[in-house]
Image (cartoon, helix red, strand yellow):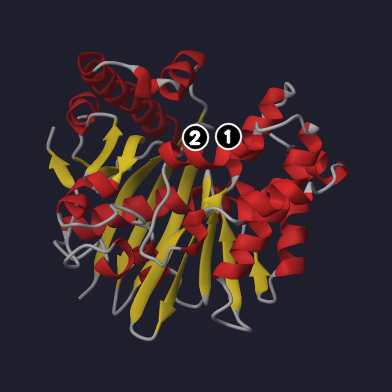
Amino acid sequence: MYKKYSVIGLMSGTSLDGVDLAFCEFEYENEWTFKIRFAKTYKYTQKWQDLLRNITQVNEQYLIEIHKELGEYYGRLIQSFCQEYQIIPDFISSHGHTVFHQPDIGITLQIGSGESMARITHMKVINDFRSKDVKLGGQGAPLVPIGDLLLFSEYDYCLNLGGFSNISYQENDRRMAFDICPMNMPLNELARSVGKEYDQGGQMAKEGLINIELLEKLNSLAYYQKPPPKSLGVEWYNSSFKNLLNEKRILTQDVLRTVVEHVSIQISNATKQKTQGKILVTGGGAFNDFFISRLRQHCNLEIIIPDPILVEYKEALIFAFLGVLRVENKNNVLSSVTGASDNHCSGVIHNP
């Protein structure tokens, strides 16, 4: 049976570099295929950057207000995106912005009210893809693996280099996936500490020296010994990872160089199950040339970096696809990767 959907996927990453919007077309005829027709990143205004960076400090009532306001902000962005590209999607599928992610105590929260977005855009909105999984005893993450399985099955591994690095792969008849380690979050914070938005191409890291003591401490973090399913959140990053970087005065370029080495080693460890094969690399970190060169040194798989649109917008694409599966009432979250009691169909639908 032939099916076709046009969807706007919305993604806001932990590194706060902006709101990714991707207008995607999905067709089904024995298997799913996709095209990213138009895509654009809207940088957060300074107001929103400051608010979201300190969001965990606000009280509950203010958080509810911000949730509503952020939904309105996303709605206006979507309106201007639709006007610019003269498009009318079937619906919007939104990841929102993660505030809390502590699945071990049953908490996950993504803000950016779907109700507000639906009201402003006059379109159907699907969001809140994580909380049902947490209620079913899962990690609420990662959610991308179902898209990797159905849209990118030709690759042995799908690696995403965002605020955190995460990976997904097939093991026998089960999809496996987990967060590996921090990636752009520490690299961008370190670059900002010396007045740069990010370390372009990894140039600063390239000039630094590895601090062996710091590298050993990072590689010894308990999280890396845990078996999947497992996921990382900002809370863990702040309490376990970031404090190691600040322990004593090391030149920023040396810390950058050490983090690059650490991430390369951890990704290599995470892909040891296969001695040959192809790894699809997407997310902002794919543009970090120095990091990719170190990854190639540590990892013996063929590293494929696709066209820049897919590098930047694969997560927005897959969140659009999660919405398609929700509308189809098909499973879009895999218990093998989240640890939930069952595969299930997740996402809350808001009609305008």
| Residue at horizontal 60 percent and vertical 81 percent from the top | 277
Looking at the image, residue 163 sits to the left or right of residue 256; the answer is left
Query: Quick check: can you spot residue 201?
Result: no
The picture places residue 289, in percent across and down from the top left corner, at 76, 52
Query: Quick check: can you spot residue 215?
Result: yes
Q: Classify the position of the C terminus by image quarter.
A: top left
Q: Quadrant of residue 69?
A: top left
| Residue at horizontal 28 percent and vertical 52 percent from the top | 140
Looking at the image, residue 133 sits to the left or right of residue 272; the answer is left
The picture places residue 348, in percent across and down from the top left corner, at 16, 44
Q: Which disc is residue 192 wearing?
A: none
Q: Which residue is mark 1?
A: 243
| Residue at horizontal 31 percent and vertical 43 percent from the top | 102
Disc 2 element: helix
Looking at the image, residue 223 sits to the left or right of residue 92; the answer is right
The picture places residue 229, in percent across and down from the top left corner, at 36, 64
Q: Which disc is residue 238 wearing?
A: 2
Of callouts 1 and 2, which one flags the residue occurring earlier in the amino acid sequence?
A: 2
The picture places residue 271, in percent across and down from the top left corner, at 57, 72
Tell me which amino acid carries mark 2. Answer: Asn
Q: Classify the position of the N terminus by image quarter.
A: bottom left
* Neighbours of disc 2 within 10 Å: few (<14), some (14-19), many (20+): few
* Neighbours of disc 1 within 10 Å: few (<14), some (14-19), many (20+): few
Q: Quadrant of residue 54?
A: top left
| Residue at horizontal 42 percent and vertical 17 percent from the top | 51
In-front residue for pair 322/22:
322
Tell me which amino acid carries mark 1. Answer: Asn
Q: Nearer the viewer, mark 1 or mark 2?
A: 1
